[in-house]
Amino acid sequence: MATPTVLYSEGKPLHTTECTILPGKELVLCVTTPEKARSVFNNVALTTNGTYVKIATPFGDSTIEVTDLIISGDEKAGGSVVVRFNDGTNTALVHTIYVASRAATVPMHFVGKVEGWKAAYLETAVVGDSFAANVTAVYIKKAVTGKTYAKWNAER
């Protein structure tokens, strides 16, 4: 026999919701991380060779953590789509897809922590020639001051 359970935090019951997946009804405790509850997304369409476009920017000197990327590009000889962190001085590659022999769509969900350094933004561009590409990033804007690039780079 199941025992009714209520989880409390600071004297208040935490949220539960009715389960509607299986026949019958039961309460299900919903648990998520604050980061997942606060993530946002942005999408950019690219066509011009070598022109980097900001896709995600942090609050001031804080950081952004990328949770998901979807990168797509039309087939173009010598073409690639680049996603990287940049603070105006230092850059760090996140991912590149190559579209020289066929169009590509690459969805990525990061299980580990893909987070930039202090004031680093996420940017993307098509490289090799002008062609159509699209990048969607899901990310979290952190509220704390990020690590310097030197410290961040030494720890990765």
Image (cartoon, rainbow, N blue to C red):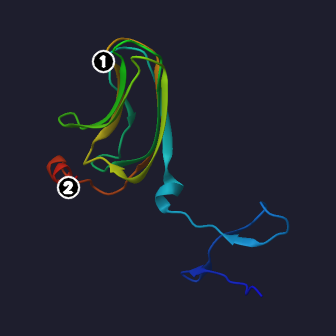
Look at the image and tell me in which quarter the N terminus lies.
Answer: bottom right
Q: Residue at x 28, y 42 (%)?
A: 120
Picture coordinates of residue 92, whole percent (x, y): 24, 38
Check the image and report above or below for 4 versus 154: below
Q: Which residue is drawn at 53% across and 56% down?
A: 37
Instruction: Please name the amino acid that badge 2 sits on.
Output: Glu
Instruction: Please name the amino acid that badge 1 sits on.
Output: Gly
Other residues around mark 1 within 10 Å, as few (<14) / some (14–19) / many (≥20): some
Picture coordinates of residue 108, whole percent (x, y): 46, 41
Q: Is mark 1 on a helix, strand or loop?
A: loop
Q: Residue 155 shows which numbered tag?
A: 2
Dot 2 or dot 1, earlier in sequence? 1
Discs 2, 1 touching: Cβ within 8 Å: no
Check the image and report above or below for 108 versus 29: above
**Distance (Cα) linking label 2 and label 1:** 29 Å
Mark 1 = which residue? 50
Q: Residue 148 shows which numbered tag?
A: none
Picture coordinates of residue 74, whole percent (x, y): 48, 17
Check the image and report above or below for 149 versus 46: below
